[in-house]
Amino acid sequence: MIHETETLKRHKNACEFRPVTTTITSRLMGWTFLVPSSGGGSTGKYGWVTRDGEVSGDLLAFRSNCEGNLKAYVKGRLGVPSALVPEPFEAPVDIEKGER
């Protein structure tokens, strides 16, 4: 998968990829991942990668911070990407008047 391939080019030990979705529509924005510390164990730092394979340059102490950064990055770089916009909907019909 592109997100893993691109991430491993920059962070060779990256693992534990978890999807990050939009809050309302649950559309995929990217993934966060763990880069274990060189000493082993369950400690390490977290990064993010977009669904198009753009990898964060920095690593943070908390996965939740990476999720927020990824969402801000996608929104800032792409505005509101069409893939993240909710499905089109029709305005409710006024049953009595038969109009929208």
Image (cartoon, rainbow, N blue to C red):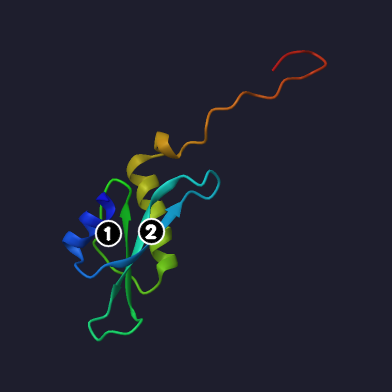
| Residue 52 at x, y percent in the picture | 28, 45
The tag on residue 69 is 2
Q: Is residue 80 left or right of residue 58?
A: right
Location of residue 75 by image quarter = top left
Q: Is residue 62 above or below residue 89?
A: below
Q: Secondary structure at mark 1?
A: loop
Q: Amino acid at mark 2?
A: Asn
**Labels 1 and 2 touching (C-beta < 8 A):** yes
| Residue 5 at x, y percent in the picture | 21, 55
Q: Is residue 85 above or below residue 7?
A: above
| Residue 10 at x, y percent in the picture | 18, 62
| Residue 89 at x, y percent in the picture | 58, 27
Which residue appears at 25% of the width and 50% of the height? Answer: 2
Which residue appears at 35% of the width and 51% of the height? Answer: 73
Q: Is residue 99 left or right of residue 24?
A: right
Q: Is residue 90 above or below residue 25?
A: above
Q: Amino acid at mark 1?
A: Ser
Q: How many marks?
A: 2
Location of residue 31 by image quarter = bottom left
Which residue appears at 36% of the width and 47% of the height? Answer: 74
- Residue 47 vs residue 19, the one in the foreground: 19
User: Mark 1, residues whose alpha carbon is within 10 Å: few (<14), some, or many (≥20)?
Assistant: some
What residue would you read off at disc 1? 56
Q: Secondary structure at mark 2?
A: helix
